[in-house]
């Protein structure tokens, strides 16, 4: 979205038209909708801008729920925005730490700033991109304690701020078609600058979960968070925002609630043991936080092979930190053998998981020529160092 498109949307006619439309789905009759809106006398530029926003609002429901219907978005801003339930947890840290005025440096479209303002914290939301700053200002308009400043974060006076939140831009500039920046020195602000704020005040930094762990400071709390089994972020917390004695955390958020594993540091792995009847696939947040060993000890489990993040036990234990499978049979990782065994069992729907083997699950499934009405899970991995296929049932 460029400035011209934003001005079209922010006009009285544009906002009325946008709010009159439902969130657009990919299977909607776009041609028919365009024709109907043009027949009503709306300009081609306005129709294009409004329909683009309606499409983004439809996608944004997954992150912002009902709030999406009253927000504006850019393509890149929506992709990078924090999910509202996650932003609420960020905001809760600042309130618990006693912060009253928080600077959100690199606020994007304003998702985290909205959550902070909703807890009645004063928010200085800073965004260097002009269009994105305008979108954030629109999204934050309902909260009197929030102010958006179009500026570079490095140029903002933070004298009256008692805590800082940063989500460094890790993609090239623009509102769509952006590319990831691999070098943390190229982020905006750079990782060193982001962590440097912690020398002056409590600071939280949102990062991608796959960051090189060697870059993480030893004096911070590092929390990996997953939502519905997808690892969505790493939060690095300093000062009063960090919890005493917590260096590593895995927070798992599902429709059933939240659960957390914490430890002072990476946990020691457990020993490799015999394959039992039950297989556990740890949540990605547990794996990223390197708390697999602590999880295994809580389950009375062992690892199936060195450096493989599957656990096994002889008795099942329900846990929010892993998906549980019953091992029906351990088979050689051989296509002909597996095709014969699956056909004999009438398996026509097959979920394939892999870890520690070089296999393309989609291509592998196609070569198995599945037939039948049954379903199963096939785990391709190493057991005691050997390539193995585990035919499993989900619990």
Image (cartoon, rainbow, N blue to C red):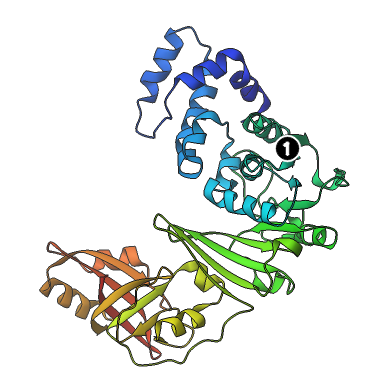
Identify the residue at horizontal 82%, vertical 47% (top origin).
Answer: 161
How far across and down, in percent of the image, does residue 346 sit?
12, 68
Is residue 137 placed above or below 181 in the rendered structure?
above
Q: Position of residue 42 (x, y in %)?
A: 51, 11
Residue visible at 34% across and 33% down? Answer: 27
Judging by the rendered image, the residue that carries numbered circle 1 is 129
Q: How many marks?
A: 1
Q: Residue at x 44, y 82 (%)?
A: 298
Q: Tell me where residue 137 appears, x and y as whole percent.
A: 68, 31
Quarter residue 125 falls in: top right
Q: Position of residue 243 (x, y in %)?
A: 67, 67
Where on the picture, by quarter, is residue 266? bottom right
Camera-side residue of 228 and 38: 228
State which quarter of the image contains the C terminus.
bottom left
The crowding category of the residue bearing disc 1, from other C-alpha atoms within 10 Å (few below 14, some 14 to 19, many at least 20), is some
Relative to residue 2, is residue 63 depicted above or below?
Answer: below
Label 1 secondary element:
loop
Report whether residue 139 is seen.
yes
- 97 on left or right of 279: right
Query: From this viewpoint, is residue 167 visible?
Result: no
Q: For the point 76% across and 52% down, which residue is it?
A: 164
Q: Quadrant of the N terminus?
A: top right
Tell me if residue 240 comes above or below residue 46 in the rendering: below
Report the side of 129 relative to 70 (left or right).
Answer: right
């Amino acid at each position: 979205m460029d400035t011209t498109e934003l001005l079209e949307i922010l006009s009285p006619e544009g906002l009325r038209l946008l709010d009159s439309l439902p969130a657009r789905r990919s299977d909607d009759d776009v041609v028919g909708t365009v024709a109907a809106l043009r027949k009503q006398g709306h300009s081609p530029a306005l129709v294009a801008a409004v329909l683009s926003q309606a499409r983004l609002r439809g996608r944004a429901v997954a992150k912002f729920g009902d709030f999406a219907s009253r927000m504006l978005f850019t393509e890149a801003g929506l992709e990078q925005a924090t999910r509202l339930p996650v932003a609420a947890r960020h905001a809760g840290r600042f309130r618990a730490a006693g912060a009253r005025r928080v600077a959100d440096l690199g606020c994007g479209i304003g998702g985290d700033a909205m959550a902070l303002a909703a807890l009645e914290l004063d928010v200085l939301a800073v965004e260097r991109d002009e269009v994105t700053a305008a979108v954030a200002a629109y999204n934050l308009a309902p909260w009197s304690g929030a102010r958006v400043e179009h500026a570079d974060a490095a140029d903002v006076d933070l004298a009256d701020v008692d805590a800082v939140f940063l989500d460094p831009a890790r993609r090239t500039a623009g509102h769509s078609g952006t590319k990831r920046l691999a070098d943390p020195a190229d982020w905006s602000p750079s990782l060193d600058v982001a962590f440097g704020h912690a020398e002056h005040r409590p600071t939280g930094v949102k990062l991608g979960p796959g960051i090189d762990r060697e870059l993480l400071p030893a004096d911070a709390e590092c929390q990996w968070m997953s939502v519905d089994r997808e690892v969505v972020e790493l939060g690095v917390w300093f000062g009063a925002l960090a919890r005493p004695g917590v260096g590593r955390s895995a927070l798992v958020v599902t429709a059933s609630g939240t659960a957390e594993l914490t430890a002072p540091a990476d946990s020691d792995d457990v020993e490799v043991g015999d394959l039992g009847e039950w297989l556990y696939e740890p949540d990605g947040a547990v794996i990223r936080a390197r708390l697999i060993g602590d999880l295994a000890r809580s389950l009375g489990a062992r690892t199936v092979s060195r450096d493989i993040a599957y656990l096994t036990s002889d008795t099942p234990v329900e846990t929010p930190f892993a998906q549980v499978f019953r091992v029906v049979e351990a088979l050689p990782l051989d296509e002909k053998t597996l095709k014969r065994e699956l056909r004999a069992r009438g398996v026509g729907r097959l979920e394939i998981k892999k870890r520690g083997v070089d296999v393309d699950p989609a291509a592998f499934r196609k070569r198995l020529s599945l037939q039948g009405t049954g379903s199963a899970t096939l785990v391709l991995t190493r057991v005691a160092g050997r390539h193995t296929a585990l035919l499993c049932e989900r619990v």
